[in-house]
Image (tube, rainbow, N blue to C red):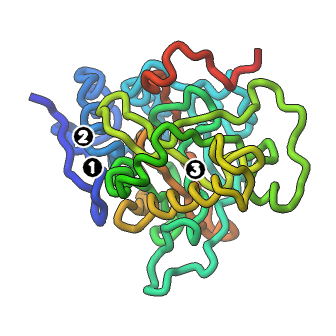
Amino acid sequence: MSRFDCQQPLPGAGFGGRLRFDGLPGAGALVAAAEAEPEALPRLLAEAGGLLLIPGMGDMAGEAGLLLRLSRLFGPEVENYRETGMAPNMIHPEVPEIFVVSNIPPVHRAPPARPEPPLTEDGRLPVQFPHRRGWHTDQSYRRPPPDISLFLAVVPVPQGQGQTLFADGTAAYAALPPAMQARIEGLEGLHASSSIGRRREAVLAGTPPQAPLAPHQRPQRQPLVRRHPVTGRPALFLCEYGQMDWLEGPIAGLEPGPHGEGARLLEALMAHLTQPRFVYVHEWTAGDLVIWDNRCLVHAATWFDAERLERVMWRTTVSGNPGEAYAGEAKSWLAA
Ligand SMILES: [Fe+2]
């Protein structure tokens, strides 16, 4: 009998779950129980379609090692950001597997811009691409890409701002017309880090891209339809303007560039994937830990008033089970 179960789906969404734990409150008790039952949380994550909310984990902020211990249950490798070239000001000083997403020193990361207009016609938070921008799956410019991300609200901003949006790539794929499913089978997106000058905006502006690229900086191909290695279910796997290669892509083998056939296909798929019916909006409460599966979900951050508010969030990234398509591959992102 497991001490964990899950309330599904998350409010207002068709997927995701809120973890329930039969034990003492606090992160220490939960992590110890999860370690005693190491298959439980990964199983519940898969059953909830790749999105799991664990409220009440605020103690982790005072004991960062707990977040690392919990992360280790989700896969064999938790990225050590000191070893992968992240700027030191973004790395947690004691636990280098945690990177800090914050608008305050020493991180100084600005939130995304507000959509234009800021609300939809019916007064709601915009979620659908292209009105909502910034949809991505973490580090998809790497091969193999990572599996799972964990995100802890240490100091969130008040609700109504700074949400995280999630879109269900499995349900969105299943809802595609069969002709579109057939069209995209076997196609590959060309994913690129936003730092190498191949973002759509940079290409449209005619900004020269970074050149030459070292092998570990090069854009990487990823299937548009990914079979989940745990559930076996197909899911859409793509990003939009900031994390695709808009010079040679965004889709390998189709007419490249922002006005090409590849762009039209990618934009149609992204608009489909991010319809409100496939999206969950997470409003953060301090101590919320949200765990998502990058293999079948995309997500986006939203604006908050960084002039007036301080926000501190901690992220870990777990990898090691990308699926058969990546079997035996060396890590593309490590410099030789
Ligand atoms: Fe992300």
Q: Earlier in the sequence, mark 3 or mark 1?
A: 1
Q: Give, as a three-letter code, the residue at label 1.
A: Gly
- Give the class, few, some or many, for how many residues have Cα within 10 Å of label 2's Cα (few <14, many ≥20): some
* Image quadrant in which the N terminus is located: top left
- Residue at 49% across / 17% down in the picture? 327
Q: Give, as a three-letter code, the residue at label 2.
A: Glu
Q: Give, as a three-letter code, the residue at label 3.
A: Cys
Q: Earlier in the sequence, mark 2 or mark 1?
A: 1
In what element is the residue under mark 3?
loop
187 in relation to 167, above or below: above
In what element is the residue under mark 1?
strand
68 in relation to 256, above or below: above
- Give the quadrant of residue 48: top left
Label 2 close to label 1 by CB (< 8 Å): yes
Q: Residue 222 at x, y = what percent?
A: 56, 36
As measured in the structure, the alpha-carbon distance from the residue carrying label 3 to the one carrying label 2 is 24 Å
* Image quadrant in which the C terminus is located: top right
Q: Earlier in the sequence, mark 3 or mark 2?
A: 2
| Label 3 sits on residue | 239
Q: Residue 319 at x, y = what percent?
A: 49, 26
Label 3 close to label 2 by CB (< 8 Å): no
- Give the class, few, some or many, for how many residues have Cα within 10 Å of label 3's Cα (few <14, many ≥20): many
Q: Is residue 152 visible?
A: no
Q: Residue 334 at x, y = what percent?
A: 70, 21
| Label 1 sits on residue | 17
In what element is the residue under mark 2?
helix
39 in relation to 256, above or below: above
| Label 2 sits on residue | 47
Mark 3 C-beta to ligand 1 under 8 Å: no
Which numbered mark, 3 or 1, is in the foreground of this view?
3
